[in-house]
Amino acid sequence: MILTTSNFDAKHRTSPAANPFRHTYLHELSHNIPIIVIMCLTAVCFLILPAVLSLVDQNLTPVTESGVVASMNQTADDTAREVVKQYVFGVRPASILFFPVMAFVLSLVQFSYLTNRRAMDVFGTLPIRRGAMMRAKMLAGVTILAVPVALSYLVIFFCNLIIVGFHQYLILELLVVLLNALVVMLLPYGLTALISTISGTIMENILYPLALLSAPVILYGFIMEVIRYTMFGYAGEAANHFVLALLSPFCEFFADDGWYLVNHGITQTLLEQQELGVGTTFLSLVSQNLIVMGIWLVISAGLMAAAVFGLRRRKNERAGLKGASRVLNHIACFLAALIGGALVLAIFSVGFLGTAYYNLRYVWFFVAILITFVAYQLIVLQSVKAMLKTWPLLLVCVVLGSGFVTFVETDAFGAYTKIPEESQVHMVSIDYSGIMGTTRSTETLQSDRPVYYNDPDLIQTVLEFHQQVVEDRIREPGNYQAIRLEYKLKDGSSMVRQYTADTQKAAEILATLNENDSFLSENHVIFTNDLSGYDIVQVSDPYYTVMNELTTEQIDLEELQQALQQDVMEQTLEDMLDPQEPEIGWIHLWKNEPEDLNEEENWDEWNMWNETAEMSILVKGSYQNTIAYLESIGAIDLMQPDYTAVQDLLIVSPTEDGGFDSLSLYGNTDPTLSLFTKNWLSGLVLPEEFDGWITETIPEADANRLSDAYQDPDKVQSILEDCYNQHGYDENSCVVYVKTMNATSELILPNS
């Protein structure tokens, strides 16, 4: 709309000439009443109502006690009702989703006159300086945006006071929430206002702010994916939350570190953490948010100040001129070229396109930069001659790309191949879980809980392993199995690295950890589980041909565990990989259904998700203490195999490439040694649904079914006596599948 002095309301006491700033401010408010109405309706519908309804639901709606609540309060009857008071505050989703869009639209509307030369000429005749008019317009815009939002959060604040009660954190939370809500509106508003003073068309006013707000985050995401899959030893996440928040304040709310602002709110999060015994303070919880939002508040204010300066220097001839700002064009082209190259590099670095693309990833990286650059310039400038004049900008892109490639290929200039001295290391953590020796072990290399060791021998072994993988320097595309090392150094610093280890030398060094007492006591299931907590005990032979139950009166699980722990400590790595004595059998343990199980759950589901609900332990021939105890209670006689119970037997030979045509061989093997030439097989029981797999899935060319032989118990015995549930295997080994009435199991036949 074209503004003239006649547009001012005559009812105002002061004439436009006397106070043009005030009249411009009031005119902007009255001229944008539709947007004010939309802001107020949005605030009521998407801020106040959801928060109040959630408060009522959490605090005033009765909840019939049942299930888990009933189990926690068994003295209450079935009609008892319990209400847990909860605060509902924080930055509401509408502040992140709707109001930044409203700020963007408002800025476009307010400064759309800058794209019309006639309107610029008319504004030049007004009795107000350009800078003062820009300040008045932006003050009106901030008022339109901030007042409805601030009033809405005040209403939510008082509703929490009335329904839940006062808490000292609420006032502080109100200030933090208002800061966050203000920043995410001021940033797009100020950026759009600044670009409106520089560019010449409405389309540029729309595209450039969106590009500048999103491009840094997109570029950073692609770069981190490349580093994650390419840089040798990198152990970080795909993206750092703090860095993302510094690139865009909107990222502050979409990560685990900042989700509390949107989910429960600060006060409720602190109260819940205090109930759990976590000593989190208000400042420690919001310190990162305050730093990030403080920086973005300063940036937003700077953008609006720059917009005032830009309007003062703006020439009317820019209005309606496409590509009026060479600076904006160069910035957008620069970002587009880097994003295009980073996207292609990220796709090729992941490795799912194959080794050929992975090896040529840097070539395609620079090709993508060139193509994106040329395409953008031709679309914007629509002139080959004009495009050729921008070659210095292309050179800058190539130089930056070359620097990034050098950074990655030199492993951050050698930082990620550096190995600490043994004298510098205080403690070390390695997420290798060891050779577990149970059928319940399905762990990968990634550990749920880091364990730190200060044992000198273990630290030396980890350093030797680290040295070996650095010398091997293998980084295969698409290889997701890696080992994470973390050193706690004596100077208080930490060093975290992550490597794939696909060589036999590295595997042999790592495997020696299975002989370290400190490592075993923290990782082996015999030490980490309490066997006395199990209710049902069954024993079987190694092939599940027989299955007999023992009562807890017949077997002392504490004494059994002590014997097993002693045997595990005494066994050597050679005993694990190449045992000389035949295996004795399995001890199977189950837990009864818990009494307080939720009525909506069932035992099968609980058993499935509770990893300790079921466990099977292999009794090896070298476990002399365990064997002696089992003999003393008569259990050994119950573990003698019945070869006549074998219903089917199948031998699978290695394929031509040295691997196994096996459904589950790699699914339950030791997580490290299965990667190498000398592998490891942990005894596995196949679910019932895989029974038919023996006869239907494996091609006869790759399998030798002893359909006649398994009917001869002597022949079956001669084969199974040479098999192991747990044994190293090589190209001369075979996999044997044994089907009985009790189970279908997978065995290894070494040196067949």
Image (cartoon, rainbow, N blue to C red):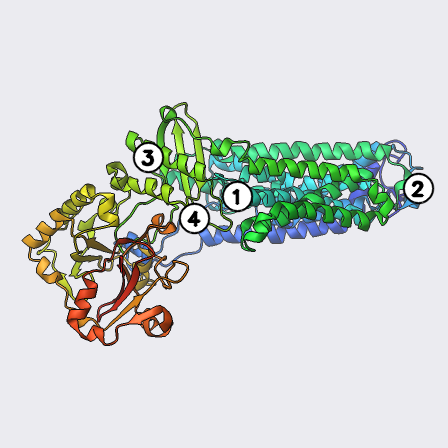
Residue 122 numbered tag = 2
Q: Can you tell which of label 4 and label 2 is closer to the viewer?
A: 4
Estimate the spatial distance between the alpha carbons at disc 1 and disc 3, rounded to whole Å.
Answer: 26 Å
N-terminal of the two: label 1 or label 2? 2
Residue 481 numbered tag = 4
Which residue is denoted by mark 1 in the rendering?
Answer: 228
N-terminal of the two: label 4 or label 3? 3
N-terminal of the two: label 4 or label 1? 1
Check disc 1 and report its element: helix, strand or loop: helix
Residue at image coords 80%, 44%:
110
Left/right of residue 301 with respect to residue 633 in the rendered view = right
Q: Can you tell which of label 2 and label 3 is closer to the viewer?
A: 3
The image quarter containing residue 189 is: top right
Left/right of residue 439 with respect to residue 487 in the rendered view = left
User: Can you give x and y, in whole percent of width and height, for residue 399 in the image?
Assistant: 69, 36
User: Can you give x and y, in whole percent of width and height, for residue 277 in the image?
Assistant: 35, 37
Depth check: give the residue in front, 396 or 491. Answer: 396
What amino acid type should be assigned to the residue bearing mark 4? Gln
Neighbour tally class for label 3: few under 14, some 14-19, many 20 plus, Cα within 10 Å:
some
